[in-house]
Image (cartoon, coloured by chain):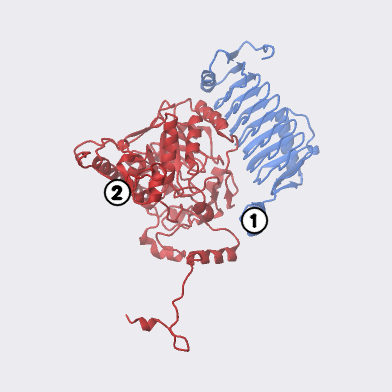
Chain colours: A blue, B red
């Protein structure tokens, strides 16, 4: 743990050095509003998961797996790095990580906004179903695999097989793409896409010009089983 | 009958030999080759393995005799209640019968069929299970005990429904396709199914075969921790696997913190999967139960972590045999659909029109089910009366429960879970080896005794 954070007076402190995860999570899950700070997370798993109210949670340090999993309405900020499955299946609210995120960040997310200010590892946005994801750095391979809906915005580069077997999600990458996945193609950036991108970047607090991005999406060639596509299945 | 009337001769007058069809290239094989050549796509169908495999029919109960005494039928009590999930959950699932309804999705089944499953299960005091596609309000409303599946696709997965569930089942695989993901073809992706799954209408949907956010037992342990945190450690968490390596899969599920292991044999049905997958991947449930039970015993977890087995359960005898081999409960899917009205000979004319016959209809993925069960067509689905169909299912579940009790009493057991391998013998060497019980009339257990 680095230096103790400077916390506002009306923030409820949950120090994980002397509070079990179960108790800390229960405190967050039962709150209807208010601000909380989790201290000494120490890479613990499943922190601040299952929240269902507009509470604000600041986690002061690195977290393990599934932090802010299935989030609804809450604003969770991790001041550190996050392990696998950050904000998995998020429904609404905002989850922000100031550092890097491990695999499967925002996996299957249905809604809300996930901001990773650093890099995200492999499978970022896998099977995403409506969430908006903004990554300040790079994303690893197989990101947006089978992505169904929502927007993945990458300010850096994307690894191999971006958007493999993608459905209707939209991918915006400012840097290079190592290789597009099966059925994922570059698409024209129309005015509506620039507007969408501008809005998402603003909500994420990221400064970047929408015009610098390239849009990718589904060629929709695999939507029906056809023998001529056998090599792609 | 005059044989000579059917035995033709060639021009020389010598009798022709009877034409011989190949056992290897039989009629079915030939038709499948022709179908593949004509269409260029593998055969997709519903249901489970149709090939003959060693099964519960190959086992017999010994019953009581001089060395064992039976319980008096209808007079002496024989309990059937099973509690699932007390290992970690504050609210374990209490079943009145050791027969549950397996996971089947809204999407693969009509809303009427899901409602009927709930009604039947309620009346019999057992649980139903959601499927790949999420939980509908109707099925939650109609099921007193509802198990919510967490599948790789996570279609329709949301924390509100998770918290409404009486148990959560993390689906790693199923017996019809261990290692494979789900399918739902375009005919069944109507507006409501598409909305629930966040998919375009009418596409041929393919589900992922691996979970998106965990890959092995160490990850699974943490995943289960997350699910418990979200549901505040109230409800049991099951792990479902297709029968393939039952010893290790069971051991790893226990290690991951599961409250119950659901083990599905290759006879277990699917809504839609490649025929080659159904018939050639995975093992029969008969071969899977003993290794799974052994894993539980080796970990001192037998009866602490419940084992629920499925795949070809048809009768109380099957249930009793599964319990005797060490399972805590069973699950039915195909049999439940038949009880609702699937493959009913009364619909033969319509099955014929679909190019099949009652008893063989397995094109569940095409959505044209005349029984209104495996369809999303509103007109067809309206044919199924959920109240009457639910009553039929309740009757069937109750009959099976009575059958299990009948056998248990005959073996002198005051609870169906007291049935044991010692009550069984096998009719074939194969089933004796798989079930770990003696070949009938001998004390020889192949692979275990000399």
Quick check: can you spot residue B135? no
Horizontal relation, residue A104 to residue B374: left or right = right
Quick check: can you spot residue B77? yes
Query: Residue sitting at 44 percent across and 43 percent down?
Result: B288
Instruction: Tell me the quarter of the picture where residue A202 sits.
Output: top right
Residue B111 position in % (x across, y down): 44, 47
Q: Chain of mark 1?
A: A
Q: Chain of mark 2?
A: B
Between the residue at mark 2 and the residue at mark 1, the CA separation in whole angstroms equals 53 Å
* B131 shown above or below B90: below
Q: State which quarter of the image contains the N terminus of chain A.
A: top right
- Circle 2: element type: loop
Alpha-carbon neighbours of circle 2 within 10 Å: few (<14), some, or many (≥20)?
Answer: few
Horizontal relation, residue B311 to residue A157: left or right = left
Residue that lies at the very extreme toward the front in this rendered image: B450
Q: Dot 2 corresponds to which residue?
A: B441
Which residue occupies the foreground of this view, B446 or A37? B446
Residue B217 position in % (x across, y down): 55, 33
Query: Residue sitting at 23 percent across and 35 percent down?
Result: B77
Horizontal relation, residue B119 to residue B79: left or right = right
- Circle 1: element type: helix
Which residue occupies the foreground of this view, B337 or A31? B337
Residue A230 numbered tag: 1
Residue B356 position in % (x across, y down): 45, 63
Horizontal relation, residue B23 to residue A63: left or right = left
Residue B361 position in % (x across, y down): 44, 59
Which is more foreground, mark 2 or mark 1? 2
Residue B53 numbered tag: none
């Amino acid at each position: 743990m680095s230096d103790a954070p400077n916390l506002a007076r009306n923030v409820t402190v949950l120090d994980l050095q002397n509070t079990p995860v179960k108790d800390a999570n229960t405190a967050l899950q039962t709150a209807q509003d208010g601000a909380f700070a989790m201290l000494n997370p120490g890479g613990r798993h499943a922190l601040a998961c299952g929240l269902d109210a507009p509470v604000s949670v600041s986690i002061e340090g690195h977290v393990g797996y599934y932090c802010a999993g299935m989030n609804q309405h809450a604003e969770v900020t991790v001041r550190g790095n996050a392990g696998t499955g950050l904000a998995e299946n998020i429904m609404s609210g905002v989850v922000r990580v100031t550092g890097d995120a491990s695999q499967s960040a925002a996996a299957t997310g249905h809604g809300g906004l996930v901001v990773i200010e650093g890099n995200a590892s492999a499978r970022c946005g896998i099977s995403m179903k409506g969430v908006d994801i903004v990554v300040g750095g790079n994303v690893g391979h197989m990101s947006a695999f089978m992505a169904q809906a929502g927007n993945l915005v990458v300010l850096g580069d994307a690894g191999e097989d971006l958007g493999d077997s993608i459905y209707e999600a939209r991918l915006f990458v400012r840097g290079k793409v190592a290789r597009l996945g099966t059925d994922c193609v570059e698409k024209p950036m129309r005015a509506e896409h620039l507007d969408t991108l501008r809005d998402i970047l603003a909500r994420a607090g990221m400064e970047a010009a929408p015009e610098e991005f390239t849009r990718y999406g589904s060629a929709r060639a695999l939507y029906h089983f056809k023998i001529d596509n056998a090599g792609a299945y | 009958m005059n044989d000579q009337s059917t035995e033709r001769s060639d021009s020389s007058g010598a009798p022709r030999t009877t034409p011989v069809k190949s056992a290897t290239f039989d009629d079915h094989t030939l038709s499948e080759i022709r179908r593949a050549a004509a269409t260029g796509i593998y055969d997709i169908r519903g249901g489970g393995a149709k090939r003959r495999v060693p099964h519960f029919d190959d086992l017999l109960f010994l019953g009581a005799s001089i060395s064992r005494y039976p319980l008096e039928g209808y007079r002496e009590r024989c309990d059937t209640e099973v509690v699932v999930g007390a290992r970690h959950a504050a609210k374990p699932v209490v079943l009145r019968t050791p027969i549950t309804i397996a996971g089947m999705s809204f999407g693969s089944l009509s809303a009427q069929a899901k409602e009927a499953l709930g009604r039947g299960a309620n009346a019999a005091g057992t649980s139903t299970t959601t499927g790949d596609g999420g939980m509908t309000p109707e099925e939650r409303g109609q099921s007193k005990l509802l198990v919510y599946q967490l599948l790789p696709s996570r279609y329709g997965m949301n924390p509100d429904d998770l918290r409404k569930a009486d148990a959560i089942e993390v689906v790693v695989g199923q017996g019809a396709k261990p290692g494979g993901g789900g399918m739902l073809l375009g005919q069944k992706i109507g507006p409501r199914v598409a909305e629930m799954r966040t998919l375009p209408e009418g596409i041929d949907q393919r589900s992922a075969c691996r979970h998106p956010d965990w890959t092995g037992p160490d990850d699974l342990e943490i995943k289960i921790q997350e699910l418990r945190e979200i549901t505040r450690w109230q409800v049991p968490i099951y792990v479902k696997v297709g029968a393939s390596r039952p010893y290790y899969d069971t051991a790893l599920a226990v290690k991951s913190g599961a409250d119950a292991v659901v083990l599905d044999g290759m006879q277990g049905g699917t809504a839609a999967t490649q025929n080659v997958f159904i018939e050639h991947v995975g093992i029969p449930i008969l071969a899977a139960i003993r290794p799974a039970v052994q894993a539980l015993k080796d970990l001192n977890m037998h009866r602490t972590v419940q084992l629920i087995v499925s795949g070809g359960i048809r009768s109380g005898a099957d249930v009793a045999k599964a319990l005797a081999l060490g399972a805590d409960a069973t699950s039915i899917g195909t049999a439940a659909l038949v009880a609702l009205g699937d493959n009913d000979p009364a619909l033969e004319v319509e099955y014929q029109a679909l190019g099949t016959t009652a008893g063989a209809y397995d094109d569940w993925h095409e959505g044209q089910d005349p029984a209104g069960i495996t369809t999303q067509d509103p007109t067809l689905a309206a044919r199924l009366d959920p109240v009457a169909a639910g009553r039929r299912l309740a009757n069937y579940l109750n009959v099976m429960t009575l059958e299990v009790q009948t056998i248990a009493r005959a073996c002198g057991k005051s609870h169906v879970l007291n049935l044991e391998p010692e009550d069984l013998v096998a009719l074939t060497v194969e089933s004796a080896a798989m079930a770990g019980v003696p070949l009938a009339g001998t004390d020889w257990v192949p692979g275990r005794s000399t």
